[in-house]
Amino acid sequence: GAVNVSYFGHSRFTFRQTKRFTFRSFAQFMTIAATSFLVNQVAYFYGLKWFGQTFYLPILAIVLVLVAFFTFIVSKFWVFARHEQANK
């Protein structure tokens, strides 16, 4: 449910896609979503392990910002990239 809403929201509003739904772009989006989740969990785990519970809020903020940036960049240039063919 939430992944579908996120995919269609990003495709229509964030990246202004005009093409129809494709399984390829949805599969790429799912890959990015799963990878981002995994990176988020691992980075937060090791951040807490290395710096301790005292710094959980700054660690969380840093991890969330970096993962969001990564997700946006990869989505823009891979998942929702506009691959226009040159006129021949």
Image (tube, rainbow, N blue to C red):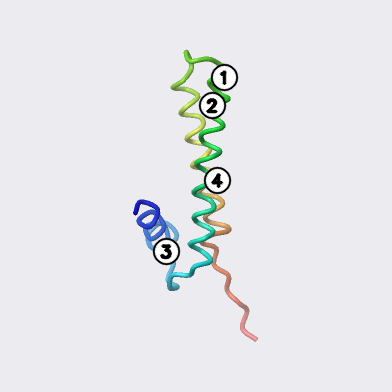
- In this rendering, the answer to whether 55 lies above or below 37 is above
Q: What is the distance, in whole Å, between disc 2 and disc 4 at their CAs?
A: 15 Å
Q: Are marks 3 and 1 in contact (CB under 8 Å)?
A: no
Q: Are marks 4 and 1 in contact (CB under 8 Å)?
A: no
Q: Amino acid at mark 2?
A: Phe
Q: What is the distance, in whole Å, between disc 1 and disc 2 at their CAs?
A: 6 Å
According to the picture, the residue beneath numbered tag 4 turns out to be: 35
According to the picture, the residue beneath numbered tag 2 turns out to be: 45
Name the quadrant of the C terminus: bottom right
The kind of secondary structure element at disc 3 is: loop
- Label at residue 80: none
Q: What is the distance, in whole Å, between disc 4 and disc 3 at their CAs?
A: 23 Å
Q: Are marks 1 and 2 in contact (CB under 8 Å)?
A: yes
Q: What is the distance, in whole Å, between disc 3 and disc 1 at their CAs?
A: 40 Å
Q: What is the distance, in whole Å, between disc 3 and disc 2 at their CAs?
A: 35 Å
First in sequence: mark 3 or mark 2? Answer: 3
